[in-house]
Amino acid sequence: KNILKKKKKKKKKEEEDSFNIWEKYPPFTLQELLKEDNHEYRQLYFNMLNEFITICNNCKPNASHYLAKKLQELDLLQGVVTQNIDGYYEQTGVDSDNIYELHGNVLTLKCYSCGYSVESSESMKEILSANHDTYIMPDCPHCKSNNHMLSGTVKFGEALDNNVLLKAKSLIQKASLIIVMGTSLVVQPANQLPGEIFKNKNGKIAIFNLGDTDLDTYESYLFSS
């Protein structure tokens, strides 16, 4: 019983940490992160990355991620459009070419000088740990610029990748059914994407969410709590 209680407490603590991480750190803007002399701000950013990547590594994909994998196996999945940055859909085996990450992926590195990007996974944590006291990321292997390699996530003050956004819109417009899961549909412009299906006269929406959304009156199927 004591072991079970300890496991429950540990799991609860991990869940609390995962939800509180965004309250512990300030919003990180791209402009401030690229300032070479902004050491304290950059340190906070690196601390947040380390913590978030640790949380991601300690957690696993859930049923919603495996649902996408199952639909792919049944040849029913055209693609996944997600605001999440943890890479869990790809971990389940969903084809990476069919995943549209609107806010990027925390396990990639991106050069903000030339646009070069690379998947880093485990190496990301090694890089962050190695540069913990210097507040710098490695030089870009493509353009050799200093201090401009950051995580491949969308920062405050940074626009979404227009190419990804356009592909997501096109995907939804051609769909016969879209499944909207776990989102309040508040954050723009992602909250406008489900409405693109109405350009297909026969398109339908299924919404699975704990709360109400602005699309609830338009949905074909609604599962809410």
Image (tube, rainbow, N blue to C red):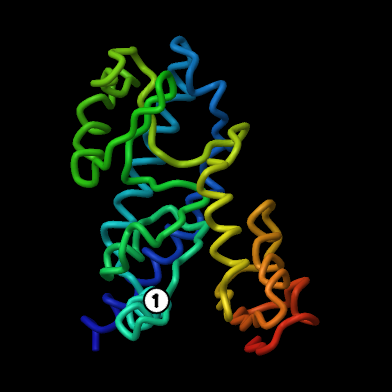
**Residue at horizontal 33%, vertical 70%?**
61
Q: Residue at x 63, y 89 (%)?
A: 223
Along the viewing direction, whichever of 170 and 142 lies nearer the viewer: 170
Instruction: Determine which quarter of the picture holds residue 118.
Output: top left
Taking depth in this image into account, of 91 and 99 the one nearest to the observer is 99
Q: Can you say whether 123 is above or below 5 in the image?
A: above
Mark 1, other Cα within 10 Å: few <14 / some 14–19 / many ≥20: many
Q: Is residue 225 visible?
A: no
Q: Where residue 204 sits in the image (x, y, percent)?
A: 65, 82
Q: Amino acid at mark 1?
A: Ala
The answer to which quarter of the image holds residue 196 is bottom right
Q: Please, is residue 213 above or below residue 185 in the view?
A: below
Task: State left or right for residue 70 relative to residue 36.
Answer: left
- Percent of width and height locating residue 163: 52, 44
User: In the rendered view, would you say 149 is above or below 17?
Assistant: above
- Could you tell me which residue is drawn at 29 percent across and 51 percent down? 54
Location of residue 109 (image quadrant): top left
Q: Position of residue 101 (x, y in %)?
A: 46, 53
Instruction: Give the labeled residue for mark 1.
Output: 68
Q: Is residue 123 left or right of residue 196?
A: left
